[in-house]
Image (cartoon, grey):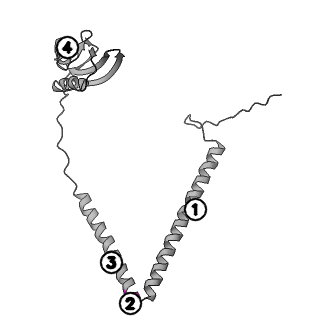
Amino acid sequence: MEHTEHQTTAVSTSGTPAPSRAQRRGARTHRWRRDTVELAAVFLSVTAADLVAKIVLHGPDGPVVLAASAVALLATALFHTWWSHRHHLHGPPAPAPVPNVGAGPTALWRVRATVQDSPAGLARVCAAFAEQRVAIVSMQSHPLPDGSVDEFFLRAPHSLTPTDLATLVTTGGHDLLDTPVRVA
């Protein structure tokens, strides 16, 4: 007789499965270990501080050295707090607001162009688009044996014509596959 194991997972109200009992147990073990390590570190640091204080206290001029160290530590902490608060409030000036160059009516275009594999080929066409305030909404590259076909979805000012977009693409070093098509 074959035994099959069925695992059921509870589903929370948000639609995601609730963690299993093993996952909850693992999380508790992990927290318990972390808490134990942190507690051990606290005990170790307190022991080290107590040892240093006892050595300094029982030495020549021990109480004076211990008090001077405490005052120096307190002064350093106060100075650091004052310094960070002072410089936090007076940070660098905010950058100047950038004018909205994309203001005005726009149109959505699809442009397909062939590209030869060359350094900065895509950067040249992007720079040509940017000069005319054309935003690349999406780009998909389709590889070919000797290059690729790049398909751009562009948001361009309403005043640009298909001829203007074709000129921008060829200026950037790409060859149009077909004429730019206005999508919306």
* Nearer the observer, 36 or 98: 36
Under circle 2, the secondary element is: loop
Under circle 1, the secondary element is: helix
Q: What residue lies at 34% left-to-right and 79% top-to-bottom?
A: 71
Tell me which numbered mark, 2 or 3, is placed earlier along the sequence: 2
Horizontal placement of 168 versus 146: left or right?
Answer: left
Horizontal placement of 69 versus 36: left or right?
Answer: left
Placement of the N terminus among the 4 image quadrants: top right
Q: Are marks 1 and 2 in contact (CB under 8 Å)?
A: no
Q: Amino acid at mark 2?
A: Asp
Q: Give the residues in magenta.
A: 60-64
The image quarter in which residue 102 lies? top left
Mark pair 1, 3: CA separation: 33 Å
Residue 64, horizontal then vertical, whole percent:
37, 87
Q: What residue lies at 49% left-to-right and 78% top-to-bottom?
A: 50
Tell me which numbered mark, 1 or 2, is placed earlier along the sequence: 1
User: Which residue is identified by label 3?
Assistant: 72
The image quarter in which residue 148 lies? top left
* Nearer the observer, 82 or 127: 127
